[in-house]
Amino acid sequence: MLDTELLQAALNIQPPWRIPKVEFSSETRQLDIWIYFDPGSEFVCPKCSGHGCKGYDTEEKIWRHLNFFQYRCDLHCRIPRVNCPTCGVVLVDVPWARKRSGFSLLMESLILIMAMDMPISKVASLLGEDDGRIWRIVDHYVSKAREQEDYSNIRVVGFDETSSRRGHNYITVGVDLESSKVIFATEGKDHTTILNDIINFA
């Protein structure tokens, strides 16, 4: 039996969360870790940040985590929904994963690093995942990063087109010519593509 305290420290699981149960199977080549919260625990409302919210009920969630050596590792938890006096019944946030993601934050970090240097289909194949799930992670963080970009100092923009694959599948790329930085890329190559992207970009 694996030491639950060691895994709790490695995953940085802090009260009111704890790891009471771990199962490892060499036959299925998988490690499963269960995360519980202490009965009577109080949580912060994820919407209004109100403190002292009591558990209302729970929802079971599973996240793909970093492999344990060559074995797949899944995290299991019944996440509490709390009854907030201001917001009503809401699902609390957990520190190891973002909402609506089937992966832990550390697993998402690994996926993003891999996606920088290889095709998404290759990342999905190596991890044994559907490429749609990988694309959703990349799209989330690319959109988040673009929201923080500041384009106010861009003065000269250039456009170019390239074929995304054999045939006539083109993409148009917009570049800040002074910094040689790509500021957007989109499908298509005619004047309407550039016009629509300038409107969206502005």
Image (cartoon, rainbow, N blue to C red):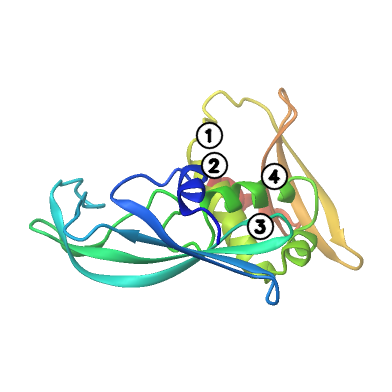
Mark 3: give few (<14), some (14-19) or many (20+) Cα within 10 Å: few
In the image, is residue 36 above or below residue 49? below
Q: Amino acid at mark 2?
A: Arg
For the residue carrying disc 1, how many other residues have a C-alpha within 10 Å: few (<14), some (14-19), or many (20+)? few
The image shows residue 25 at horizontal and vertical percentages of: 64, 72
In this view of the protein, which residue sits in the foreground, 39 or 110?
39
Residue 91 place in picture, x, y as percent? 28, 63
Q: CA distance from mark 3 to mark 4?
A: 34 Å
Q: Of discs 2 and 3, which sits in the foreground?
A: 2
Task: Give the amino acid at mark 1.
Answer: Glu
Q: Which residue is mark 4?
A: 113
* Residue 199 appearing in the image: no
Residue holding disc 1: 149
Which-is-in-front pick, marks 3 and 4? Answer: 4
Q: Give me the C-alpha separation between circle 2 and circle 3.
A: 22 Å
Which of the pair 127/13 is nearer the observer? 13
- Identify the residue position indicated by label 2 in the image: 146
Q: Is residue 179 visible?
A: yes
Q: Horizontally, is 120 left or right of 162 in the view?
A: left
Give the CA separation, mark 1 to mark 3.
24 Å
Report helix, strand or loop for mark 4.
Answer: helix
Q: Position of residue 199 (x, y in %)?
A: 53, 48
x 24%, y 65%: residue: 81
